[in-house]
Image: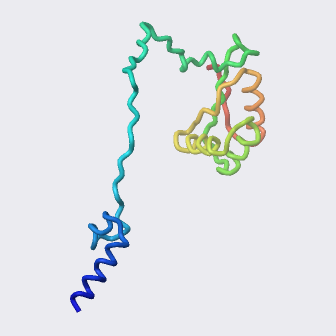
Amino acid sequence: MPARLAVCAVLLLAGCNHVTALTVGIPATQPRTTRAAVAVPDTATKPLPLPSTWEVPDTFSLSSLQRPDTPDSEMFKLTLFKSSAAEARVVGALLEVVNGMESERAELINRKAQTLGFALIGIWSQQTAERYGNALQNRGLVVDISPE
């Protein structure tokens, strides 16, 4: 009987590779570590030297945000004041009147006006600010147009 067990053990181990034969009792799902090959250059390379001066553009200049058709014209602020108008009416009016206004921005302006008493809608040329202000006033909102 023990001879048969020895023959079975030899047959079982003969079908396995060397690593599996030595890892009896370790689950097969356990990850095995592998080593990655690293490429090494033939010669050492030196990085390029850093420049002696740095040219950093002024990205926070508001003058670059002005439209080219009104380079020297005075800009005007359009301010919304707290009123008894319903929130949906205020947000809807802002979305209808102000070109490119997103709903999140309109809701934020309305919340600021209701909590602080006023909120800046935007800054435009006098003609645009007056056009937006008149349209918002026609919808029952309280707004002010003033020079920046």
Above or below, 11 against 55 in this view is below
Q: Measuring from the top left, give residue 96's x and y in whole percent.
A: 76, 42
Q: Measuring from the top left, give residue 106's x and y in whole percent.
A: 65, 42
- Of residue 106 and residue 119, the one placed in the foreground of this image is 106
Q: Residue at x 34, y 58 (%)?
A: 32
Above or below, 43 against 97 in this view is above
- The quadrant of the picture occupied by the N terminus is bottom left
Above or below, 79 against 109 in this view is above
Relative placement, left or right, of 115 versus 103 is left
Relative placement, left or right, of 8 versus 101 is left
- Of residue 140 and residue 26, the one placed in the foreground of this image is 26
Q: Quadrant of residue 98?
A: top right
Q: Measuring from the top left, give residue 78's x and y in whole percent.
A: 66, 29
Q: How many marks?
A: 0
Q: Quadrant of residue 33?
A: bottom left
- Of residue 11 and residue 77, the one placed in the foreground of this image is 11
Going by the picture, which residue comes out furthest to the top?
52
